[in-house]
Image: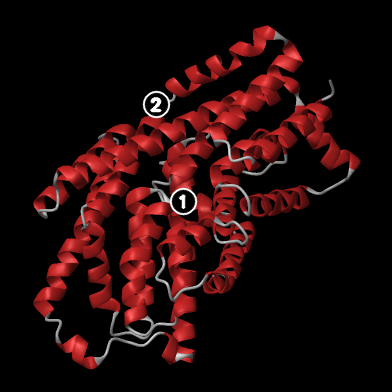
Amino acid sequence: MSSEFITIFMFTTMLVLLFTGQRVFGVIGFVGTVAALLLWGKGSFEMPFNASFQVLNWYPLITVPFFVFMGYMLSESGIATSLYRMFHVWFGPVRGGLALGTVGLMVLVAALNGLSVAGMAIGATIALPQLLKHGYDKVMVTGVVQAGSSLGILIPPSVVLVLYAMIARQPVLELWLAGVGPGLLMALIFSIYIYVRCLIQPEIGPALPPEERAQITWSERFRLLRSGILPLAIFVIMMTLFMTGTTSMVESSAVGAALYTLAAWVAGNLNRKVLELSSRNTMSISAMFLWIILAALCFSSVYDGLGAVQAVRHLLLESWEFSPWEILIAMLLSFVVMGMFLDDTAMLVIVAPLYIPLVTGLGFNPIWFGILYTITCQIAYITPPFGYNLFLMRALAPPEITLIDIYRSIVPFFLLMVLTIVLLMIFPQIALWLPELYSGR
């Protein structure tokens, strides 16, 4: 069979099975195994087992359950509520201040978790009711929560970047460091948009009324500031231990998980229910993550043996005569289109075997491309008709926020994310300066 036929067979079969509602890892692993059997016979049935050894030998993967646990402990123990109250008090006197505080909360949650779902849950259940209560425009603030929560897959410790590192065979730390600049840049762009729009239209983001501000004493402000700084201080301790070489990445993640549990206990919020919920959710997410990586390696091993990457490269560069930048833009557009129907994990697993070798072959930096991929995932999260964050917001939002409101709310933030991608393509050092600084050290 030709590589072109196998490529069409694998991708078509995978998409058809995914639309039937089957689990992502089952579909990917099944298609990879069947393709291997068709190509090389029964001996190739061992390919998934060989892929499992790669997973078991990849030490940094142990960080995933620790970081997921940190996020759930943050949410379940009530620490997130104190964080939002801190932003509420300190940013409230400014026009649009509560929305700006929500962006700050999302950045902090992203730095403590690595998943967008935690930011969405915290933003929709804690921040959104307060924003609506204080007279903020429901369309704007719905977009703020959706776009802000997507920062969780870009700012370290991003679990999506861990998966990309595994499949692309790139160092996780460099990818995490590369996500810092673009993540903070995107948060800054969101904040500038909110502030300017609220200056132009004060009615959509009013400041806290004077009587409410008068009720907040300075002692309460500083008490909330201390409670909000504590989670951030734990993150700084954890990353400092790692960056200085005192602990490995896995050891640092374990330290972080232990410190967040201790912080919940000190705050008086740690009980059996919180511990059980956090542990169960962590086990569920981590097991799913491991199965997806195993299936992805099985799938990609077929392409490694088939040589399909070279065939696609020949088609794009020589037959169709696309320039490297045209190919790169087409890749990013395909992520956005697929993201309308699939989640970020499925997207990466489906196209990584083709795209990542092609990216390196075209002379692009795979670390930089990983950040571009992650931002396109963020765009896909809020893109109709099936953006993940759209439906999660619909499930969590108050009744007065309709699906039309949710769709309208993402338009300006979609454009701001596209602007971030354009800036990264023009100035790749936004993502690469920190990894280069660390590796140069």
Residue 59 numbered mark, or none:
2
At x 33% / y 69%, what residue is drawn?
Answer: 127
At x 20% / y 86%, what residue is drawn?
Answer: 213
Quarter residue 336 falls in: bottom right
Q: Which quarter of the figure is the C terminus placed in?
A: top left
For residue 351, side relative to residue 176 (left or right): right
Q: Secondary structure at mark 1?
A: helix
| Residue type for callout 2 | Tyr
Crowd band around label 2 with a 10 angstrom C-alpha radius: few (<14), some (14–19), many (20+): few
- Measure how far apart labels 1 and 2 are at the Cα level: 21 Å
Q: Secondary structure at mark 2?
A: helix
Circles 1, 2 touching at the beta carbon (< 8 Å): no
Crowd band around label 1 with a 10 angstrom C-alpha radius: few (<14), some (14–19), many (20+): many
Image coordinates of residue 277 in percent, x first then y, are: 26, 43
Seen as rendered, the residue at the extreme right is: 319
- Whichever of labels 1 and 2 marks the residue nearer the N terminus, that label is 2
Image coordinates of residue 190 in percent, x first then y, are: 47, 71
Name the colour scheme: secondary structure
Which one is in front, 167 or 206?
Answer: 206
Q: How many marks?
A: 2
Which one is in front, 432 or 189?
Answer: 189
At x 34% / y 60%, what residue is drawn?
Answer: 122
Give the labeled residue for mark 1: 153
